[in-house]
Amino acid sequence: MLGSYFASLLFFLAEVLNVNQAYIMVALLPVLPMVHILRWNIREKFKLLSDLKDFDLEQAFCRTEFDRNFVHGAIEKWYGSKDAFMRYVRGPLREELMVQQSTYVPFGYFLLVSTATFSASMNTTTGMIKAKTPVDCILSEFLGHGVGFYVFWFVSCLKISLSLTEQIAIPWCRGYVMNWLQSFLMFLVFVALYATGFYVSSVAYQHSLEASLIWLAFSFLCCIMCFCVPRCVDGMRRILGRVL
């Protein structure tokens, strides 16, 4: 969320300084450390799931002996014995978590992040209203650029980037530099998606209101597909996991 607002601030500064289209790359730089941190978090989650197969209750850390006795007593009461609990963690629990290991972020959270870019785009719309620009032009800019790009397409970019980041969370090669290069590659993918949408939406809203509506419908469809398709795939995986 903070990164989104910081990127919007960089966009403003780049426009004020009259920088060319390369400002997109500069303004999106906060995405790079966020991608790297996200890869680290996902990698730690995968490691945790992998370590569950060797889970040992006796190695679990408790701050005080009282807490340890209390937890162990509750486990023996609920599961019958410590061994039964460890078998459950190593088996059914781990298998259930492995099936749904993909990171789930609610759609509303993505919309919340997009408020930063959308609110920034409202400056242009407000300026056009104050300048008494024709209504068709205002609607074209608002629907095509403000909603189509800064909401639907931006949310699609975030969702696609999150999915791809999960796939490359594990470093391909050893080394600090290579790990950052891997994050930078993911960053370039995000920039390419963002810049493509920015260019298409700009051409659409400057062309006509009809072109903006077409772009709006396309970006909305992409946004819906980004969220519906993965959930359908995860649902099928869960069903197959229970059947098999």
Image (cartoon, helix red, strand yellow):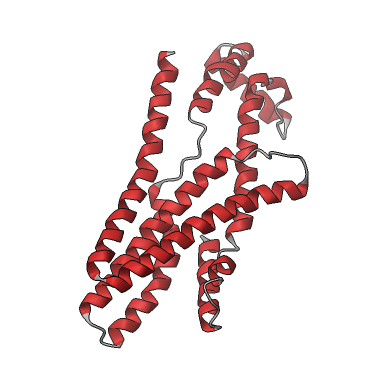
Q: Position of residue 119 (x, y in %)?
A: 40, 70
- 122 relative to 65 in the view: left or right: left
The residue that appears at 34% across and 55% down in the rendered structure is: 219
Quarter holding residue 26: bottom right
Q: Position of residue 155 (x, y in %)?
A: 42, 54
Q: Nearer the viewer, residue 143 or 95?
A: 143
| Residue placed furthest toward the right | 175
Q: Is residue 45 above or below residue 6?
A: above
Q: Position of residue 238 (x, y in %)?
A: 42, 24
Q: Nearer the viewer, residue 169 or 67?
A: 169
Q: Is residue 196 above or below residue 232?
A: below
Q: Nearer the viewer, residue 36 or 212?
A: 212
The residue that appears at 46% across and 40% down in the rendered structure is: 104
Q: Position of residue 224 (x, y in %)?
A: 33, 47
Quarter holding residue 201: bottom left
Quarter containing the C terminus = top left
Quarter holding residue 27: bottom right
The residue that appears at 60% across and 14% down in the rendered structure is: 87
